[in-house]
Image (spheres, rainbow, N blue to C red):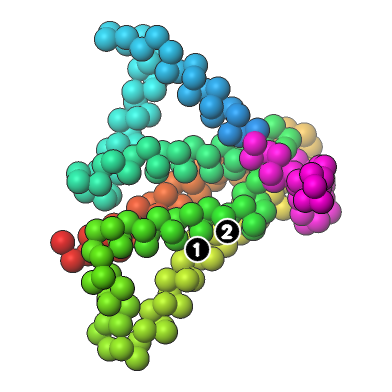
């Protein structure tokens, strides 16, 4: 974790490709993606009918995510588990990078907004797929003059999701930087357990819960 000035300064440019600046947020996101791919390859090898400890851990995680999706979105939407699980792990691992002295990509609003936009498109894609034209007509309900307000409310969702995640992670980074510069070494280590680990996983959980609720309401509220 850098100093307070470094945290507030934002993500630095690491290198440039064809005139495009590649920032710490992009590079650190690549690191997280690489780690997740490696873990997926390692934990998916040599799966057995009678699982060992390694496979038991994977099955517990998969069963937990499946149960969460099923209880939140209903049994008919359990096929969303791979998507929800991927988003959760990607955001969670991004959030906890501060433990390893790296800047969390989710402390950059452009990153969290991108996650919000992905959720936004998922909401409307699956709602259109489930309801067709009636979903578009629903924006004019109960009165047609509410159409602009309903559209603004939908457009605001990705900004709300992105800003909530960004604000919490940036706030945690600022507090950790202030603590690191003010107190003994063991105290920031203890604080990091909360701000980087516990809070990081908590914010990831909140993000996927809102994602599941928004998708379910959009596609299933008339079923």
Q: Is residue 99 above or below residue 136?
A: above
Rendered image: mark on residue 113: 2
Q: Is residue 155 above or below residue 112?
A: below
Q: Which residues are magenta?
A: 1-30
Query: Callout 2: helix, strand or loop?
Result: helix
- State left or right for residue 147 relative to residue 97: left
Front one among 116 and 210 = 116
Q: Is residue 215 above or below residue 31?
A: below
Rendered image: mark on residue 158: 1
Q: Locate residue 138: give its quadrant.
A: bottom left
- For label 2, the crowd category at 10 Å Cα-Cα, with few meaning under 14, some 14 to 19 and many 20 or more, is many
Q: Report how many numbered discs are placed on residues in the image.
A: 2
* Residue furthest left as drawn: 223
Q: Position of residue 26 (x, y in %)?
A: 69, 44
Q: Position of residue 145 (x, y in %)?
A: 34, 91
Pointers 2 and 1 in contact (CB under 8 A)? yes
């Amino acid at each position: 974790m850098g100093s307070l000035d470094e945290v507030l300064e934002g993500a630095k440019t690491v290198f440039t490709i064809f005139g495009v600046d590649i920032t710490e947020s992009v590079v650190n996101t690549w690191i997280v993606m690489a780690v997740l791919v490696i873990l997926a390859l390692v934990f998916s090898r040599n799966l057995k009918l009678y699982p060992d400890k390694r496979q038991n851990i994977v099955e517990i995680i998969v069963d937990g995510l499946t149960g969460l999706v099923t209880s939140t979105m209903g049994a008919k939407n359990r096929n969303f588990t791979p998507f929800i699980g991927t988003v959760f792990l990607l955001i969670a691992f991004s959030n906890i990078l501060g433990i390893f002295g790296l800047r969390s990509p989710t402390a950059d609003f452009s990153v969290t907004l991108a996650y919000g936009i992905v959720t936004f498109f998922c909401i409307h894609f699956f709602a259109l797929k489930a309801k067709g034209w009636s979903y578009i007509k629903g924006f004019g309900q109960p009165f047609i003059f509410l159409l602009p307000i309903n559209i603004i409310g939908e457009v605001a969702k990705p900004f709300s999701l992105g800003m909530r995640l960004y604000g919490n992670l940036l706030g945690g980074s600022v507090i950790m930087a202030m603590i690191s510069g003010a107190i003994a070494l063991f105290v920031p280590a203890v604080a990091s357990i909360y701000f980087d680990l516990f809070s990081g996983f908590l914010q990831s959980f909140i993000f996927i819960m809102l994602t599941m609720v928004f998708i379910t309401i959009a596609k299933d509220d008339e079923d």
